[in-house]
Structures are given as structure tokens and as C-alpha cells.
Amino acid sequence: MKVRVISIAETLEEGQKVTAVALKYPEQIAAGSVSGEMFSVPGRSITRCYVNDSGGKGDVQNRGSYVMLELAVDPVPGSPVGSTLLYANQSNHRLPICLSVVQKRNISALGGMQLPAGSFVNTEECNLEVDGIFGAHTYQNMHHGTTLDYRLFEPKDRQEALPLVVFLHGAGERGDNNITQLLANRSALEWATPAAQAAHPCYVLAPQCPLDTSWAVNVGTKEEPVYEASYALKNVLNVIHELIELHNIDTSRIYGTGLSMGSMGTFMLAMDEPTLYAALLTVCGARTYQDKQVKKLLNKPIWGFIAADDMPPLVEGMRRTFKQLEELGSVAAKQVGDEAWNGFLRGEKADTAAIRQLAKAEALGADILYTEYIPGTILPNGHLSWMQVYSTNAVREWVFSQKNKAPYRPAK
């Protein structure tokens, strides 16, 4: 008997994990003919068993040719149970999914056929929120012979001009597989969920930086660094220009965001192209920039986030950059020290904290916002504050409320 075995993986806050498996049988099965006790998945706990004809997680029907087994995920922060990624040598590596499923006893199909007990290994996989949703593309720079892999989410209704969100990943997602930037965390995916798109339909660009570079590179010295856009970041700008030509994008509403290395790249691209972004959302990353570079960000809506117990160089970099902005003329609304955010908050409670800071910014006439999280409230370590930032609706609402006075026009 041939049984298709499809592992179902989804990107959770801490990264992608296998959360279910679909068994496709040659015959229809009644819901009452199967239960979780009839199966086992070594190393995993089965939490739910049901049938359907779609192979979709959560689709519970009375009959179907698919048996769906949902798998428990360890709630302890940092648990590797079910993870499809291995972080080693400062990079996330996508692991092959090898899932064994044991059918302990025969199943009686609706047509009378006996589906014999046996063991199976997955031969297919489904990446929820990625497959068929974020298209895979490669940009080729004909002048320099370089390439840039990227993923693009395209909204369903594209009749009117819509915003573009440019998400730059961190150092751990560099590579050439063009998928890790969507699997290591939910930062890019949060802009493309059905709920997010219902509120603010937009395009989402998620490029992948090659292993041999960073988004921004130091062309100075260690003692006196001077940061410039890497060839990869310049290619990101080229991709943005191509997308503007190919799609109906509202060029007065292009938004830049990124985490860690991607935050540094977001700052860098905005400094090189001051009229590109309508707003910046930067998370846990900044470098030492020259005043002449930072001046180009004045009057630009910027909201920066970092945990107070993140890696000291990153905390120092974020604090320095926002202080530099203030010294050059920006007005900042800060939530630090006793006013720092609690990283354990989610949903409405996190929205309330954001709305409170936005009210403070309005009262101050601030054009930039800076937020730190209380030490010990970002788990499993303080560097992962993007989990809280990108899942907070009010933060994304702030982004979409910003608009450039004039549309961005690429230089000829």
C-alpha cells in the first residue's frame, strides 16, 4: 500500500518547526475510524487526529483520504523539538525533514478496504505561509555579474497602488537557499498574514544576503569605521526599482525594516537614498555612522527597538545612533529604564504600550521613537526582540500611517 507522507512545517516565533504530518491514503476514511492512539511519531507527541480531503492543517471533516496528525511543540523557549533549523557557525542551516510515522493497526476504509498497519517516512513537505505565498526570484546584475535571491509576497487585489515593505534579515539568515529568511523568524511573514493584509494590503520584499558579505560593510578601519552599502544592498535597491516598474506600487509608501544586521542595512539604505523610505522600523542593530550620513535621516519617521540586555555592542550602537539623531535636530520619544517595555506582553497589552508611546511622541512633537525592553523579558536571550516587535499590531499600524510628501523616483 502506497501512502504519501507530507510533513507540515510552520514558522513560529523562534523559527520553523514541524507541527503536523499528513498521511494520504488510497481510500476514503471515516472520522470515527482513526484516532491519535492508532499512530506514533518517534520523538513527538500527537495532540490531535482528524481526516479531510485537503491535506490542510485544521481542516476537520467527517471523511477524507488524508489522516492529519498534529504534533506538540515544546513551549520552553529555545527548545529544539521539531525544529527544521540548526544554528551553527553564526548561521541558520535548513535541515532535511526526516519524520517517521507508525500506523499501529489496520484501518477500515469506507469502501471496505483494509489499510494495513505499517511504518512510513515523509517524502514531501509543506511550508505553511511560504509555499505558494512568497514567490522565489533571483535578480541578476548584468553590470557586475552578481545575483540576489529574494522572496516576494504579492497582494491579491492589485488594482490600486499599494505600499511595499522591504524586510532585511539578520546575519544568521545569509545563504543561497532563498528560504531561510522566512523560516528563522516570523518578521517578514507578519506583514503578509490574512489579518495583516486585510488591514493593510501591501507587497513584501524579503531578499537573502549572500554568505560572502553583509548588508553594510566597513570600508574604513576598526578604529575609525566608515560604513557603505555592500554589493548585496545595492542589488536590493535595484530590485526595488524593478518592482516599481513591474507592479502597481505606491512609491510614497515604501517602508524599510530589518533586524540586527538587517537593521544596519535599513539605516544604510535610507542614508544612501533619503527619499526612498516613508518610515524606518529598526530592530536591535546599528553601527557607528558619520554625522553627514545620519543628517540624511533627519525628519524621517524612525522607530527603533532593542532589549536592554541584548549584546552590548548592539545596545551601544542603537543608543548612539538615536542620540546622534537627537543631537543633529530630531525630537525623540523614548521608553527606556523605568519606562522600558515588558517583552512578555503580547496582543492588546503590547498594543497598549505602543499606543502609550505614540501618544507621548505626539505630545512632544517627536519624529523618532526609541524603545528598550526590560532585561530578562526577551527569552531565550535578549537578542530576539524582533519576536515581540513584529507581532505588535500597533507598531505596524504606525508604519502604515507614514507617507512621503512626494513619491520616490529612482534616479535615471
Image (cartoon, rainbow, N blue to C red):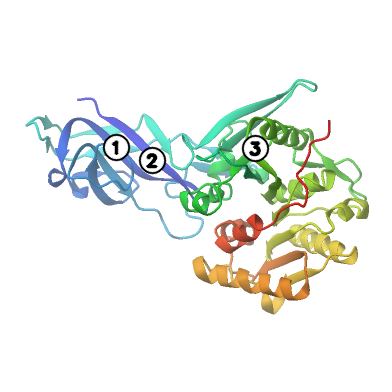
Question: Could you tell me which secondary element the residue under label 3 belongs to?
Answer: strand
Callouts 3 and 2 close, C-beta under 8 Å: no
Q: CA distance from mark 3 to mark 2?
A: 24 Å
Percent across and percent down for residue 42 are 31, 44
What residue is shown at x 52% (from left), y 42% (from top)? 85
Q: Quadrant of the N terminus?
A: top left
Instruction: Give 113 or 98, whichever is nearer the viewer.
Output: 113
Percent across and percent down for residue 153 are 55, 39
Q: Quadrant of residue 245?
A: top right
Q: Quadrant of the C terminus?
A: top right
Amino acid type indicated by mark 3: Pro
Q: Quadrant of residue 396?
A: bottom right
Label 2: few (<14), some (14–19) or many (≥20) C-alpha neighbours in 10 Å: many
Instruction: Specify whether residue 210 is in view.
Output: no
Q: CA distance from mark 2 to mark 1?
A: 13 Å
**Residue bearing mark 2:** 8
Percent across and percent down for residue 106 are 12, 36
Q: CA distance from mark 3 to mark 1?
A: 31 Å
Ranked by sequence position, the earlier of labels 3 and 1 is 1
What residue is shown at x 72% (from left), y 72% (from top)? 362
Amino acid type indicated by mark 2: Ile
- Rendered view: 100 above or below 284: above
The circle drawn on residue 207 is 3
Question: Could you tell me which secondary element the residue under label 1 belongs to?
Answer: loop
Callouts 3 and 1 close, C-beta under 8 Å: no
Percent across and percent down for residue 50 are 23, 46
